[in-house]
Amino acid sequence: MLMIKRQLQAELELLRKQYSILAIMGPRQSGKTILAKACFTDLPYISLEDPDERALAAADPRGFLQRYKHGAILDEAHNLPLLFSYLQTHVDENPTTCRFVLTGSQNFLLHEKISQSLAGRIAIVTLMPLSLSEIKASHAIFTDLDTCLLKGAYPRLYHEGIDARKWQKNYIKTYLERDVRQIKNITDLGKFQVFLTMCAHRIGQLLNLSALAQDCGITHNTAKEWVSLLEASYLVFLLRPHHRNFQKRLVKMPKLYFYDTGIVSALLNLDDSIATNPIRGHLFENFVISEMMKTSFNRGVDPQLYFWRDHAGHEVDVVQEQGQDLIPYEIKSGQTLTPDSFKPLNNWMKLSGTPRGNLIYGGDKSFIHKEIAVYQWNKEWYESL
């Protein structure tokens, strides 16, 4: 199997010299196991999804860890959270020689135990599906933007060449039948799939939980719990509104996005006719913002991304915090820009005193328009973040 070089590898090489325990978090099939094995060839590999290994570790945690005095890769470690308390003692007794690498695709289960048992002893990184720069480095060629939006970025679609839509449908089915029940025992999976699909319809929009709950026939609290579940399993993320108001009243609801546009496309049964679909603009916005998230994660830092919108309707798609500076980004899916395309940024720059802005669009030419840098969708705008 071809290994696509992951940008996060450089960060892992640094962290392994500083911490006894590393955790690689991220969605299923994002490449965590392959990356861990590639970076830590000196460590044995144990999958805690294997019932026999899990049973041995559960029955005798101390004895299990003694088998790996110098460390190991513990794959899908969230399957045995009780192990973390014993892991703390194990590494404390061997602080210079012991190294463990944990992987997990269920965020809150692993983080809950980490906060209780491993605080100060562990470095946590997040591995998302492939970034656009990783895909380009693997010599994969996108013929057009719509192909990119429909295919998404999960590694197997690139190093195995399998049918994207069939894989996406199976991914969703496996997620519903296995992960959802494991994280939270939801008995009505049919209703949850409707909820998941309705979330896909709402990408790039303000998340109104009451309206979402009503459309799905569930309570407000259930909708809130289910969104948290989707966040915990790395399917969706919420973009929060920025708090700086510039003497304006601001909206308080977050916006909803998926980490992968291919999963959205599969949920909504989008095909080559996407060019005329009204959701295309939101899908492109989702693509760009998820690329921004990946860029931050690959550098080992938490994304500092927000949107800004006041009650008068003035809005900027993304505001990135860089120290005390706020860097605005506007996102347009079309190939043609008009004077109206620059109005949101011009308004923001006037209001905030920001000297420059950025616009990412679906065209094929990058240029400078007054104080605004305009980037084509598939060029290195993400490297300037």
Image: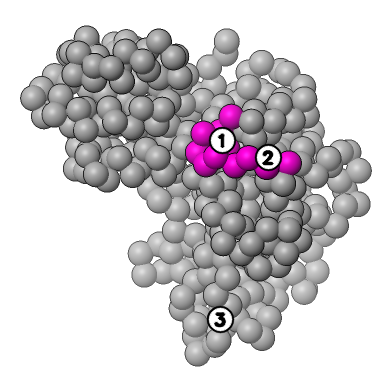
353 lies above or below 173: below
Mark yes or no: residue 186 visible: yes
First-in-chain label (2 vs 3) = 2
Q: Are marks 1 and 2 in contact (CB under 8 Å)?
A: yes
Q: Give the extent of the magenta segment.
A: 178-190
Mark on residue 250? 3
Disc 2 to disc 3, how far (Cα)?
36 Å
Disc 1 to disc 2, how far (Cα)?
9 Å
Mark on residue 189? 2
Residue at 13% x, 29% y is: 89
For badge 2, the amino acid type reads Leu
- 48 in the magenta segment: no
Residue at 86% x, 46% y is: 274
Residue at 52% x, 65% y is: 240
The residue beneath circle 1 is 181
For badge 1, the amino acid type reads Arg
The reply, left or right, for residue 79 in relation to residue 133 is left
Residue 56 is situated, as x and y percent measured from the top left of the image, at 32, 13
**Label 3: how many Cα within 10 Å (few below 14, some 14–19, many 20+):** many
Mark yes or no: residue 131 visible: no
Dominant secondary-structure state across the stretch colored magenta: helix
**Among all residues in the image, which is located at the extreme left?**
93
